[in-house]
Amino acid sequence: MRSIVIPVALLVCAAWGSACSVILPLGGPAGAADSASPDLLADGPGSLDNASDGACACPLGCDDAGACKTFVPSNLPAFPAPTCAGISFSADGTIDTGTCLVLFCKGTLVPQSNGPQICRFAVGQFVITQEATVTVSGPNALLVAASAVVKISGTLDASATGRIAGPGGWDGGDIVNDGFGGTGTGGAGPGGGKHCGCRAVVDGEGDDCGGGGAGFATAGGTGGSELTTPVCSLVGAGGPTYGNDGVIPLQGGSGGASGHNDSMPSSSPPGVGGGGGGALQIVALTTISLEGKIRAAGGGGGGDYGSGGGGGSGGAVLLEAPLVSGTGKVTVAGGGGGGAGTGTNSAGTLQAKGNPGQDGPDTGQAWGGIGATAADGGGGMGGGGGTKGPTSGLPGDRGGGGGGASGRIRVNNLDGKLPPGMSLNGDATSGALQPH
């Protein structure tokens, strides 16, 4: 009879009050011979290979002593031993990186020197079935390290919601007194879009310019000006690039800036900035299978009666396993800039709002919001660094927001190549694992 060591048995439920099941870890503990016949999972790190034909059956190969090799995940000092047997979602659910708790599986908060904290779960396996959408929220980035397999057939979503960032990202600019006598703020984060803060007088008023889109893998788009020739030295510039292809540290997207209005309190409130997409790292010692979706998209800039808000930049998704496969989708697209509204008429009555920018989509670029009229600036498209709101070169009552830039996708596997069947919407790069 086989002896099974269970670090922690996890009670997994489709939903509270529904039927639950216990997931037990498979394969032998580290440092021991794995005697399952046949193996349901590949031999674990440090386990002795038990292939009967003498060939190495470990996914990363065997060392000279016959033990299975492992690898050090990015953003961690070593591959963590599982503290929960598994996390499985068969219905819609949530992961809060603030509490770092999923059902009865408690994660660990891991600090980063140059990025947000990481909520890390060390499990045997991580599964999201086709029927389930799992929404990730909270202030910290999410890292799931599975000593066996990861299978995502449903949706794992760490995107921004409006101006609120995804986990490990930064919020978009809000509508407050900016200190210049106007309304609005720049986006938060290292690639935050800039708020124009312009007090240059034009026809007795300031330049109601759109907020800058946030940057990440590329620079964000510049917000549109109210004027044919902008007179404002503090334009709504797009946010700068930051981070690196390896996604070290693990960090999400930045926020777009809100639009600007030249009076406070505002009679024509501008649009808020879109939040940055979140940061996700999924690691497995054997296989990551993605047939569903992983989303860490930026939020679209707001459209209101005033100038448009800038789009948030997409977040970051890092996948690491010997084999990463599937025909699913990963998106870290930036949000589109918000369109400008018509403000008030001569009687002081609010007229029409501009349209908000599109949140980062599964494929392609986000559309910028359309201005309320032909004279009002439209928002810039997201992705590829964003584009300027149309009124940056054309006369208009108010400017549209700049588009948010794309985020980063990284795949590290044995062959160092991107998975051929997977749809990757963002700045995607790959690298080779270094087994030891």
Image (cartoon, helix red, strand yellow):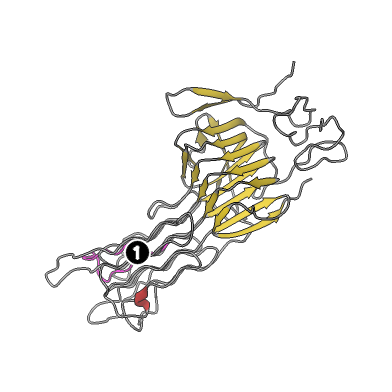
Residue 388 appears in the rendering: yes
Q: Amino acid at mark 1?
A: Gly
Q: Tell me where residue 267 appears, x and y as whole percent.
A: 21, 65
Residue at point 66%, 24% (across, down): 6
Does dot 1 land on a helix, a strand or a loop?
Answer: loop
Vertical order, 172 against 109 (above or below): below
Q: Tell me where residue 377 appears, x and y as whole percent.
A: 32, 72
Answer whether residue 259 is magenta in the image.
yes
Residue 185 appears in the rendering: no
Q: Tell me where residue 401 appears, x and y as whole percent.
A: 37, 68
Nearer the observer, 107 or 71: 71
Nearer the observer, 116 or 211: 211
Which residue carries the number 1 mark? 369
Mainly helix, strand or loop, the magenta region? loop
* Other-residue count near label 1 (Cα within 10 Å), few / some / many at <14 / 14–19 / ≥20: many
Q: Quadrant of residue 304?
A: bottom left
Vertical order, 291 against 222 (above or below): above
Which residue is farthest top? 1
Vertical order, 341 against 116 (above or below): below
Nearer the observer, 361 or 342: 361
Q: Is residue 78 left or right of residue 153?
A: right
Residue at point 75%, 33% (across, down): 43
Q: Quadrant of residue 353?
A: bottom left
Residue at point 74%, 19% (across, down): 2
Query: What span is colored magenta in the figure?
Result: 256-271
